[in-house]
């Protein structure tokens, strides 16, 4: 009697372990999709291929999937006198109305500088033309 | 045997997680794994201590023709001594093993069958002197770290195999100590699982 309980349990173990081995194939791929990982297709295939190596590569796929984060940006920048100006953390968010006013001002300024530059270029071109005619 | 216990725990966990639809979270998975390490470790240690198991066991046939004159004995089959069965157990279970204790044996060459047996004597010496020395010359005795235990296989189903087993047959044996009888059924089931696995060629 106990013989057959043991045999039944062995069969149960074989089915359960096989099911478990297949069930964990997709976990790294799931993590990669969640993070919008650029290598998510590669991680998906590697998951299935690792099944044929008895999941020897499977733990590494976790590392691969977790190595990328979509919104990753430097969060630990230290600011001191030696920090270059471009390394400084973004300024505090200004409110929308102020931002719009800033943009309008900038456009006016840029248009003015454009007119000045255009005028200078025309004058330089005319000078060159008259010089070449004289020659 | 330890591997079987770990795989059994793992398979039960997989089934429970799948059938009860327990989500894989940072609480449920560590509880199952760390709990499993503790549970299987304690189980292995307790079973090994109270119901010791060994796969270092051999049946030795001490063939000694009783009839000295072959010509005369022509028609009579040569009488041989009863085969002796010796299993080598770890020394830490020494005092859990008493003469007459219940035991079970399964042979690699008889897959799927477990035979009931009984401890005849715990031998105190290997090939030396004294009443309790090994009753035969054992080629592997010097390499064995454990203590030799002489076991009588009492199962009537064993009779038909006894004469035909190879001289040195590899076997697995367990002895059931007096304490923690509730856990003996686990050891019995594991031994039967090992017995079924003898249908497969050895993996390790």
Image (cartoon, coloured by chain):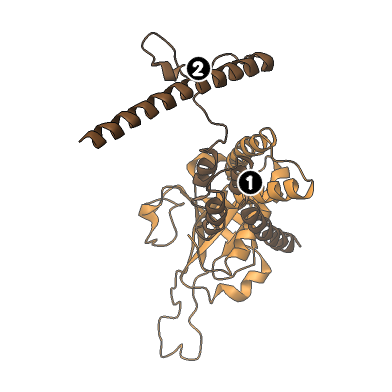
Which badge, 1 or 2, comes first in the chain's sequence?
A: 1
Q: Place residue B127 in its image quadrant.
A: bottom left
Chain identifier, colour orange = B
Q: At numbered mark 1, what does the secondary structure look like: helix, strand or loop?
A: helix
A118 left or right of A14 in image: left
> Which residue has dot 1 on it?
A30
Residue at (50% x, 43% y) in the render? A64
Q: Is residue B153 above or below residue A108?
A: below
Determine the residue located farthest toward the right in the rendered image. Answer: B20
Q: Is residue B163 above or below residue B13?
A: below
B139 left or right of A52 in image: left
Callout 2: few (<14), some (14-19), or many (20+) C-alpha neighbours within 10 Å?
few
Residue A118 in percent (x, y) is at: 43, 27
Chain identifier, colour brown = A
B62 or B22: which is nearer to us?
B22
Q: How many marks?
A: 2
Residue B196 in percent (x, y) is at: 63, 65
Residue at (36% x, 53% y) in the render? B142
Q: Place residue A130 in its image quadrant.
A: top left
Tell me the subunit letter for badge 2. A
Residue B49 in percent (x, y) is at: 58, 41
B101 or B42: which is nearer to us?
B42
Tell me the subunit letter for badge 1. A
Q: At numbered mark 2, what does the secondary structure look like: helix, strand or loop?
A: loop
B181 left or right of B104 in image: right
> Which residue has dot 2 on it?
A89
Residue B172 in view (yes/no): yes
């Amino acid at each position: 009697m106990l013989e057959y309980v043991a045999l039944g349990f062995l069969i149960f173990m074989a089915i359960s372990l096989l099911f478990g081995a297949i069930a964990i194939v997709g976990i790294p791929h799931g993590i990669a999709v969640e993070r919008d990982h650029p290598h998510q297709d590669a991680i998906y295939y590697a998951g299935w291929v690792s099944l044929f190596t008895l999941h020897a590569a499977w733990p590494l796929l976790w590392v691969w999937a977790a190595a990328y984060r979509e919104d990753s940006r430097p969060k630990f920048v230290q600011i001191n006198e030696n920090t270059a100006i471009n390394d400084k953390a973004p300024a505090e968010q200004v409110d929308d109305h102020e931002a719009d006013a800033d943009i309008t001002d900038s456009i006016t300024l840029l248009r003015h500088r454009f007119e000045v530059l255009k005028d200078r270029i025309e004058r330089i071109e005319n000078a060159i033309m008259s010089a070449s005619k004289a020659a | 045997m330890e591997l079987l216990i770990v795989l059994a725990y793992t398979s039960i966990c997989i089934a429970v997680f799948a059938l009860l639809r327990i989500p894989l979270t940072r609480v449920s998975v560590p509880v199952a794994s760390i709990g499993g390490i503790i549970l299987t470790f304690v189980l292995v240690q307790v079973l090994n201590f109270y119901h010791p198991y060994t796969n270092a066991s051999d049946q030795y046939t001490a063939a000694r023709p009783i009839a000295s004159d072959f010509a005369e004995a022509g028609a009579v089959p040569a009488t041989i001594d009863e085969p002796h069965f010796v299993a080598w157990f770890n020394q830490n279970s020494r005092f859990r093993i008493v003469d007459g204790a219940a035991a079970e044996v399964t042979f690699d060459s008889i897959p799927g069958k477990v035979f009931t047996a009984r401890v005849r004597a715990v031998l105190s010496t290997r090939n030396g002197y004294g009443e309790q020395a090994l009753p035969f010359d054992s080629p592997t005795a010097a390499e064995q770290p454990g203590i030799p235990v002489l076991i009588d296989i009492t199962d009537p189903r064993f009779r038909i195999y006894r004469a035909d087993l190879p001289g040195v047959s590899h076997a697995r044996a367990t002895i059931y100590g007096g304490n923690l009888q509730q856990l003996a059924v686990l050891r019995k089931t594991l031994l039967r699982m090992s017995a079924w696995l003898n249908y497969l060629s050895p993996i390790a």
